[in-house]
Image (cartoon, rainbow, N blue to C red):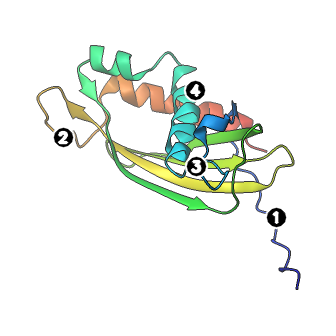
Amino acid sequence: MTPPARKPVPALSGCTVEVPVRFAECDPYGVVWHGRYALYFECAREAMTGRFGFTATRSLAMGYRVPITRMEIRYRRPILADTTVQVTARLRPPEAARLVVDYEIRDDSGELLASGETEQVVVKEDGELLLTLPAALAELVRRILSDQERQSP
């Protein structure tokens, strides 16, 4: 019996990067090991913020840490070696000093392979949790959100 066709999921708009899938990233089942998906998400998130000159290294130089406090991954289809996937990251408008990013991983045909989200908080070097975004980070967020709006269909 053929499984029912999946309803297409509209693509997430945001910063998209292509990631080549290497054989070494696969598990004994011949598919990408589940822990690698987090690395694929990170590639897209770093590209999204890096476009505006903001990296983890720069954050540390400014006196802030932005650790991930929550990650969720929904696996839909396996990712196979020797393919290329498109990974998209999209920042949600923050309500506090908390950054939530949505992700999608799609194959060359556009089929959704996985989706997820991360949540990050902002803390000072001394460990103090911030409740509002510092001005420099707020400006970065504003620029990312503005760029995302320009890209949205």
Residue at position x 18%, y 40% in the image: 129
Question: Which quarter of the rendered picture does the N terminus lie within?
Answer: bottom right
Q: CA distance from mark 4 to mark 3?
A: 26 Å
Secondary structure state at the residue bearing disc 1: loop
Residue nearest the observer in this picture, 142 or 130: 130
Image quadrant assignment for residue 56 = top left
Q: Are marks 2 and 4 in contact (CB under 8 Å)?
A: no
Query: Between tags 3 and 1, which lies in front?
Result: 3
> Where residue 18 sits: x, y (%)?
72, 32
Tag of residue 27: 3
Tag of residue 129: 2
**Circle 1 sits on which residue?**
8
> Where residue 61 sits: x, y (%)?
28, 13
Residue at position x 61%, y 44% in the image: 26
Q: CA distance from mark 4 to mark 1?
A: 26 Å
Q: Amino acid at mark 1?
A: Pro
Residue 109 sits above or below residue 51 on the image:
below
Q: Amino acid at mark 2?
A: Leu
Along the polypeptide, which appears first: circle 3 or circle 1? 1
**Circle 4 sits on which residue?**
47
Q: CA distance from mark 3 to mark 2?
A: 38 Å
Query: Between tags 4 and 3, which lies in front?
Result: 3
Question: Is 140 displayed left or right of 131 in the figure?
Answer: right
Q: Amino acid at mark 3?
A: Asp
Q: CA distance from mark 2 to mark 1?
A: 40 Å
Q: Residues within 10 Å of mark 4 (few under 14, many from 20)?
A: some
Residue at position x 72%, y 47% in the image: 80
Query: Between tags 3 and 2, which lies in front?
Result: 3
Q: Are marks 4 and 1 in contact (CB under 8 Å)?
A: no
Secondary structure state at the residue bearing disc 2: loop
Query: Between tags 2 and 4, which lies in front?
Result: 4
> Where residue 109 sits: x, y (%)?
87, 48
